[in-house]
Image (tube, rainbow, N blue to C red):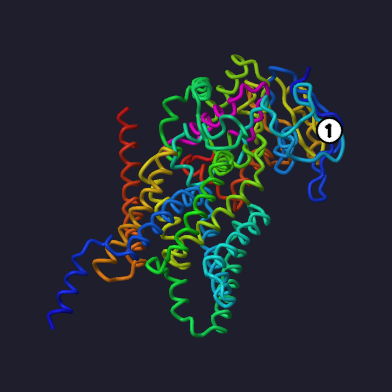
Amino acid sequence: MSALSFDQVSIKLAGRTILAGVSFAVEEKEFIGMLGANGAGKTTLMRAALGLVPLSGGAISVLGRPATRGNASVGYVPQNRGNVASLRLTGYDIVASAAGGAGWGLPRLDAAMRREIDWALEAVDARALARRSLSEISGGERQRLFLAQALLGRPRLLLLDEPLISLDPAHQKSVVEIARRLRDELKIAIVFSAHELNPLIHAIDRVLYLGAGKAVLGAVDEVITGPVLSKLYGAQIEVVRIKDRVFVMAGDVDVERDAHRHEHDGARHDPHHDHDGAHA
Amino acid sequence: MTAPVTTLITITTAPMLDYDFMRTGFAAAGIVALLAGIVGFFLVLRGQTFAGHALSHVGFTGATGAVLFGLPPLAGLVGFTVLAGFAMGLLGEKLSERDVAIGMMLSLALGLGLLFLHFFTSYASQAAALLFGNVLGVDNRALASLAILAAISLAALGLIAKPLLFASLQSELAEAKGVPIRFVSTAFLMIVGVAVAECAQIVGVLLVFTLMVGPAAAALSFTRRLYAAVALSAALALVEAWGGLTLAFYSDWPVSFWITALSGAVYFASLANWRGMGRASGEAERRA
């Protein structure tokens, strides 16, 4: 049984084709790096796997069942999180808001829920961190808390949407390390989207590359090649390797770096990014 | 000559609660402050304070319209604010947070309210009461209405509190986990409508911020814990409302002025406190 499989999936949003007949299968306990230019559909693909986006064709199955909203066996860390006021609350209270899923009534925590929250915080080594308010910790530390939150309910598939965005290299490394450790210790499959391959290259099992409505899943050496990426970008792409780093170039532009920079030129203001400083 | 002086002394030195209108005023202010402090906390957490402000202006239209048709202003207030909250919720989270759309609704509503007043020129004092509040004008019937509406609102808020909190803190994750975002936010804006209407009775539609937003924003600067912040928000609103009444009784200045003064003082003190909290923990971190 695959952790996540797409079978001829097509998605149109506001008349624009995001995915056109995409098929791939992520196996259990696999760590997948998902890459692609801005607008290639990385976030849409994750939202579709969560049952939040209607398909115009094909089928998605998650752990052998059709993708539906509210599936407890899928953990999710969305890219755009929270708001300014919530930064004043402790990490614990933020994490705990997800405990028990989508129930009604007063937000009460029983002993079992508290144990579950403690376990999840322990899994990412964030119990001390959770006592402070979000505004007092770094972007990388916040990312650890959101990972802990995604672990509530003991998922078998984790979808992490750009968890490295605007983190400095040291924090990027620690987030990737924690994700890899979670995969090893908890035996969960992880789909981890990113703008750049290099921070992930040593941790991932395979890479899922999106572009031009298509997706290619395979080993890094098979996918990150000139011919494959040229098709996905619809432009002449060269892959340059320097020691163990890989650069994807269109002409003389590093497309991954370029995509990353555009993200931050946008008007979108995310308060979570304020304390991180270096936008590596 | 001595009789009026004696009367004056008796009035000023007599305990406030000997007066019926003061007892009613305290009860009304207490009910409204608790509702506003709790509902306002979620409003601040969700970053929808401007929506709350706009709802109060819609309430002005409702109240003046009700007066024009010979209905109690509270009925018009609540009717309009709850309907407007419902409409805002249906427009969707993104749209209802748009400043321009809300700002236009706000001026449209005040303009209509003005037109209603124009048809009923003898109600200038009514207009002042609506704009700046008249807690001492609350009668027993209005008090009962305030209590019942507050109880219903708090019960409804209790039912949606968990998904509301989840959606307020992390809307995308909550959506993925199956929280009906649109339903929850619409229900919440209707509850806000009731709270705003009740606040307008105490401090007037122009000063709703002072009880709905001030205490909640201050509470978030005094504590990092969720439940403590909700409780503190309600407590601050209560202290500010009752404090305002007391100060007004002894100074003869308007109640609404005193409530805004207290709310403002607490809020600005909280800003200073938050900076202090940030520094202290920063130092602790460096030492560690």
Residue drawn 23% across the image and 61% down it: B15
Residue A32 position, x and y percent, is 69, 24
Residue drawn 54% across the image and 27% down it: A148
* Residue B91 vertical placement versus B274 (above, below): below
Which residue position is annotated with label 1?
A22
Residue drawn 68% across the image and 27% down it: A191
Q: Nearer the viewer, residue A55 or A8?
A: A55
* Quadrant location of the C terminus of chain B in the rendered image: top left
Residue B142 position, x and y percent, is 47, 63
**Residue A4 position by quadrant:** top right
Q: Nearer the viewer, residue B282 or A37?
A: B282
Residue A86 position, x and y percent, is 49, 43
> Are there few (<14), some (14-19), or many (20+) residues within 10 Å of tag 1?
many
Q: Nearer the viewer, residue A24 or A71?
A: A71
Residue drawn 62% across the image and 18% down it: A183
Residue B69 within the segment the image draws in magenta = no
Residue A153 within the segment the image draws in magenta = yes
Q: Nearer the viewer, residue A151 or A217?
A: A151
Residue A201 visible somewhere in the drawing: yes
Specify start and end residues of the magenta stretch as a single range: A136-163
Q: Amino acid at mark 1?
A: Val
Residue A224 position, x and y percent, is 74, 28
Q: How many marks?
A: 1
Helix or strand or loop: what does disc 1 sit on? strand
Residue A221 visible somewhere in the drawing: no
* Letter of the chain that mark 1 sits on in the rendering: A
